[in-house]
Image (cartoon, helix red, strand yellow):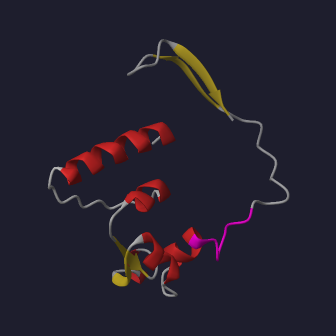
Amino acid sequence: MHPSDDSRLIDTLLRLRDLGNTILIVEHDEAMMRAADYIIDMGPGAGEHGGEVVATGTMSDIMKAEASLTGQYLSGAKEIPIPEQRRPGSGEEIVIKGARHNNLKNIDVNIP
């Protein structure tokens, strides 16, 4: 989703919560996690390497949990570095012509 959609969705979920509803979301979006009242971090890896509860609590609790890889990235203890050099593109592209679905108005797009 676009970040502006994130904030609208978060506002809607908070209003539902404030009306007395319990909201449960499976999400990886940082803004959504920061807005959550309570987080259950599953892991320690993905797929067959996951399935265990590695941390629970508030965003602060998750960031302090040593077993939480999510918390390590959210706290800044770990980061994904931006490569110093990018690989060159192939020069090829995907071409979309006359897109007219949803809010698209017969546009052409070239995607490298």
Task: Confirm whether the magenta stretch covers residue 77.
Answer: yes
User: Viewer-proximal residue, 17 or 31?
Assistant: 17
Horizontal relation, residue 86 to residue 22: left or right: right
The outermost residue toward the bottom is 66
Q: Is residue 2 visible?
A: no
Above or below residue 101? Residue 42 is: below
The outermost residue toward the front is 18
Q: Is residue 40 visible?
A: yes
For image coordinates 60% across by 23% down, the residue present is 109
For image coordinates 85% across by 59% down, the residue present is 84
The stretch of residues the image draws in magenta is: 75-81
Which image quadrant: the C terminus? top right
Q: Quadrant of residue 100?
A: top left
The outermost residue toward the top is 106
Q: Position of residue 93 (x, y in %)?
A: 67, 33
Above or below residue 94? Residue 44 is: below
Horizontal relation, residue 70 to residue 54: left or right: right
Above or below residue 90? Residue 72 is: below
User: Viewer-proximal residue, 90 or 51?
Assistant: 51
Horizontal relation, residue 89 to residue 46: left or right: right
For image coordinates 21% across by 48% down, the residue present is 16
Q: Position of residue 29 (x, y in %)?
A: 46, 56
User: Viewer-proximal residue, 102 or 95?
Assistant: 102
Q: Position of residue 60 (x, y in %)?
A: 47, 74
For image coordinates 42% across by 61% down, the residue present is 33
Q: Quadrant of residue 73?
A: bottom right
